[in-house]
Amino acid sequence: MTQPDVPAAAHRPPLQVLLAERGILLAYINVMLHDLHGAEDILQEALLLAMDQDFGDADHARAWIRVTARNLTFAERRRRGRGAYLSDDLLDLLDTAWREETVNAAHADRIVALQACRDALSAAARRLIDLRFVEGLDGQAIAARLGRPLNTVYVGLSRTYRRLADCIQRRLGDA
Amino acid sequence: MNSRSDDDLMVRYIEGAASAEEVTLLETRLRTDPGARREFVRLAHVQALFVDLPRASVVIDATSPPFRRWHVARAAGLVAAALVLVAIALVARPARSGVATVTALQGAVRCLREQDVVPLRVGDAVQPGDQFALAGFSTLSVSWAGEVSVDVEQYSILTVGGEGASTIYLSSGAVHAVVISHSGNAFAIATADGVARDLGTDFIVHCDAGGTAVQVAAGLVMLENALGRVTVPAGRSASLHAGRAPALEIVPPHGQSAGQRQPAPATIPAPAVRPPPPPPPLVDVTSPSSTGTVTHLDGQRRAFTLRDDRSGETSEYRAHFAGGHAEAIVARIASLQVGEHLTVGYIEQEGRRALSIVTTPPP
């Protein structure tokens, strides 16, 4: 039987591992950028560059894409100008926490869990989440829309994120 | 830690709303408390998950069983449309001669070409060796001289083969291939598990860490790897796993008895042990199994309405998009045409329920 010459890119289970950890990679980038859509672009570019790499194993791929994503994010930050960000050494200090978070369930399972948890939120919390992620409003715009103080909006988002994180952990059994 | 004010500060930072003084305060807290660092990462992770969550509510209409419906994220289309605008705004390279042409895209689709990351637009040539990694809500359609059309789903990673080879190397994700004619070599989709080679057909290949699944809508597909070969006819599915011979899936849709199964073509050689099937597409559809005619397609190609041949009743089938597992079936729905005659049922695999769409002749 003749088979096409399959290039290395088709033989890279580590790439699939990276895709399965897409959510945490987006979070990793967003902590350095404060822009989820920008984080998506950077992750896409990092994944493209990853296709040209020969990874020994999944851990190698994880380490490589974090360094690459970090470099791309810093380049994007320089292009955008100033912002208030955590220092580089604090980002290094967070590495263990990112690794611990990575060992939990795959991205697709988390999305399903999040959907169920979101549906179980109170009407007020659900409204807040919809304004933030369906309408894409930032805190200021949400505060204006609801006629509430800005701090109230962030307190509400904070409670809701934590509630969702707890709910996801319960559903995935990884609490 | 985890006091309320600490959480608030973390979320203000994650949302990009923290002042320089607040960032300093947060940094001090994170530096001294491993528990705070874990909580910070946990909250940041939850926020990022929303990028891939359908943008609207999922509602079960429990008042009208058995026609309960999952209503999906219509706003996902709006997001996709917005991303198209972003793509259009990107500086595109002029079209060059290549093995194929981009015929449609959604979102900001880029490829890696000779170490450069290149944004794509409709009409661009696809070069041998081009590599693609599609982001969420991005799709790409590529045509090989009008003979082969391939739709690539979001989150897919693939490489285009060399001149004359008409081969895609799929590292992960899902592609839907429609082969109209051949002027040269057969079209093939290779994964780490083996090769799907068309014999004039319409088929979907889904590849992830669990293996490769192939669903054939029309014609024939030959699956092969170093351990064997199997021919997959229309309406059938098969799986490919590294280290095992290809194998047909033989589970019929609900309501169809074993005696109604189509005969399984021989596998050469027959695998000694049936490999476990890959995870099925995670598609939640609660309308009943039915055979009938497609009467309506929604604007976003995520749902269709089927009029049952016997009862004349219509049911809506709507794929509940759920991340990387559902691409294959979503791609199948996107390929449907009004007037097409189908049998829609379900496949149970490892305790999970997946939609099965099989083209059938009209009565």
Image (spheres, rainbow, N blue to C red):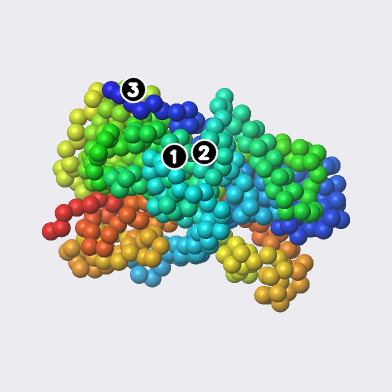
Reading the image, the residue beneath label 3 is B226
Give the side of residue B134 with respect to residue B190, left or right: right
Q: Are marks 1 and 3 on the same chain?
A: yes
Specify few, some or many for label 1: CA neighbours under 10 Å numbering under 14, 14-19, or 20 or more.
Answer: many
Q: How many marks?
A: 3
For discs 1 and 3, the disc positioned in front in the rendered view: 1
Amino acid under disc 3: Ala
Q: Residue at x 84, y 55 (%)?
A: B20
Specify few, some or many for label 2: CA neighbours under 10 Å numbering under 14, 14-19, or 20 or more.
Answer: some
Is any atom of residue A35 visible in this view?
Answer: yes
Frontmost residue, A104 versus B188: B188
Frontmost residue, B187 versus B340: B187
Q: Secondary structure at mark 3?
A: loop
Question: Which chain hosts label 3?
Answer: B
Amino acid under disc 2: Arg
* Label 1 with label 2: CB-CB less than 8 Å: yes
Frontmost residue, A168 versus A129: A129
Q: Are marks 1 and 2 on the same chain?
A: yes
Question: Which chain hosts label 2?
Answer: B
CA distance for labels 2 and 3: 30 Å
| Of the image marks 1 and 2, the number of the one nearer the N terminus | 2
Pick out the residue farthest to the bottom: A147
Reading the image, the residue beneath label 1 is B127
Q: Secondary structure at mark 2?
A: strand
CA distance for labels 1 and 3: 28 Å
Q: Residue at x 51, y 55 (%)?
A: B107
Q: Are marks 2 and 3 on the same chain?
A: yes
Reading the image, the residue beneath label 2 is B113
| Of the image marks 1 and 3, the number of the one nearer the N terminus | 1
